[in-house]
Amino acid sequence: MNNYFCSIGKDLANDIDPVPNPLLCGNYEVNDKKARFYFKAITIQDIRNAFAKIKTAKSSGTDCISSYFLKLALPFIDNSLTLLFNSSLEASQFPDAWKIARIVSVFKDGDKEIKSNYRPMSIFPVISRLFEKLIADQVYQYMNENSLFSPDQSGFLKHHSAATCMLKNTDKCYKGFDLGKLVGLVFIDLKKAFDTVDHQILLEKLMLYGVQQCELSWFKSYLTNRKQFCMSNGTESDIGDIDIGIPQGSCLGPLLFILYINDLPQPIKHSTISMYADDTSLCYQSSNMTQLIEAINMDLKELDTWLQGNKLSFNVAKTHSMLLSTKQRKNTLKSRNETLHLKICGNELQDTTKAKYLGVVIDCSLDWREQIQSISSKVSRAIGFLKYAHSFLPMETVIALYRGIVEPHFRYCCSVWGCAGKTEVNQLQKLQNRAARIVTGSSFDAPSGPIIEGLGWTTIEELIESETQTMVYKSLNELAPRYLSELFIRNSQLSFYNLRSTEADLRLPKKRTSNGQKCFSFRGAKLWNGLTAESKQASSLNSFQKLI
């Protein structure tokens, strides 16, 4: 397995025809301000703050020193660590001992006998992860202060999440429905994206983002001379060399990857692009099917060129397209025999009626029935375990199990799919009612309302409302990406609103259809306007959540 992990990135990169890199050729600019990045000296307090964010449950690396032990020893070694880290920065050298990774094979999906269905997760020494965390914090701060991150990227960034990315995408789709447009989506899958990152291209990109020579030498040292081995059933494989790709499981890896693909949206001229790390989607709207197909195909061709120039490639078999429209429009298209025909690398994409993106099942009508069914299936299995556990565990433990294995399914991205129909939401409510009866040992026909209230649980509808209101609060208070903040306008910003009682309210955008009213910018504003004045003016997120 280790031989496969060590060679797969190079093998894939060698199969890609050499194409000039558009950014390195000067096709576009990514650092208009000519900002420059220099390392800052690391202080003892920096180390203490960074270590507090490292989970003590994390596995130890090749040095066999656990994070728990380091936490105990930190007051006695923090000064030595400060000297060690700063010496590394001054010498532009990353210690070779910290470049050896123990690989854990993480199964993704599909056939367990196929090696490509496993993801290599690298485990490094805790001290190495601590050092990387400190450097990553400096780079993040520099990129944010100079607005260098692509606004289309939502992965690994502060205040960004899968939910914010999905809200942005679905808001656009519902607005398209409201205008009577067809919406074309492409869910793009890349082949082993982290494993095929070219180090030389990455270093040249870092230089364009303003990383100076000494700092660039440090990053070069960090990337080169890396080694890894796999461990299975207590047996270690031979150590293999890695000269391509970015280690998954490191603290700097995710940041370096999003910097590597940060300019990916640049050649896209027609579609809206969204990225969550390497999970990428294209979206284009049009009233005309022919125009929609032409526009997306042109963008896919440009994207293919960009990928080749960056030694990355499409996984055509797992890249899917989807045509979103209202049921009435679908019937019209069917009668005309109009379908979505998109191509990548000469291969026609598989058109689908549902797809899983960022853990959420999207269907071609955006009515969320498939997502609700997916949640119901997962929750039903979890409730079966609750029923089994209730027979021998105390009630407090079973309640904790509910919080850990049932509620997260209800909560995940519920601000996105929460606009589903009442029938679908009620389907989830019935499952919560069932869980409540099991936890309390109540009979199957006992009224669920008093039981849920007694447990202090929120109903599904209440959960959806509170999560949506919380996301609006974040959007209005710089705790969410700008692409969500821009969806809302306060009445106080409009000259014709001068009533103090409504100035904290949000302007409710006009929508022609019920689909239009499902967009986050509409239902979020409507729920917000229904809050008390005290809630809207809460000074912190914690205070807001207590008031709603």
Image (cartoon, rainbow, N blue to C red):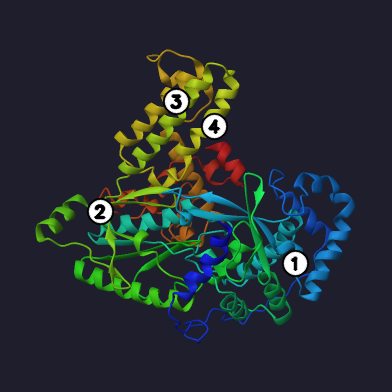
From the viewer's side, name the closer residue of 50 and 454. 50
> Does the CB distance between marks 4 and 2 fall below 8 Å?
no
Q: CA distance from mark 4 to mark 2?
A: 39 Å
Label 3 residue SS: helix
Instruction: Give the mark, 1 or 3, whose residue is nearer the N terminus.
Output: 1
x then y, percent, for residue 49: 76, 54
Q: CA distance from mark 2 to mark 3?
A: 44 Å
From the viewer's side, name the closer residue of 295 and 297. 297
Residue at image mark 3 = 384
Q: CA distance from mark 1 to mark 3?
A: 49 Å
Q: CA distance from mark 4 to mark 3?
A: 15 Å
Identify residue type, mark 3. Answer: Gly
Residue at image mark 2 = 512
x then y, percent, for residue 156: 57, 58
**539 relative to 85, above or below:** above
Identify residue type, mark 2. Answer: Arg
Residue 509 lies in quadrant: bottom left
Identify residue type, mark 4. Answer: Arg
Image mark for residue 538:
none
Residue 41 lies in quadrant: bottom right
Mark whose residue sits in front, 1 or 3? 1
Instruction: Give the mark, 2 or 1, whose residue is nearer the N terminus.
Output: 1
Q: CA distance from mark 4 to mark 1?
A: 43 Å
Residue at image mark 1 = 96
Q: Residue at x 53, y 84 (%)?
A: 24
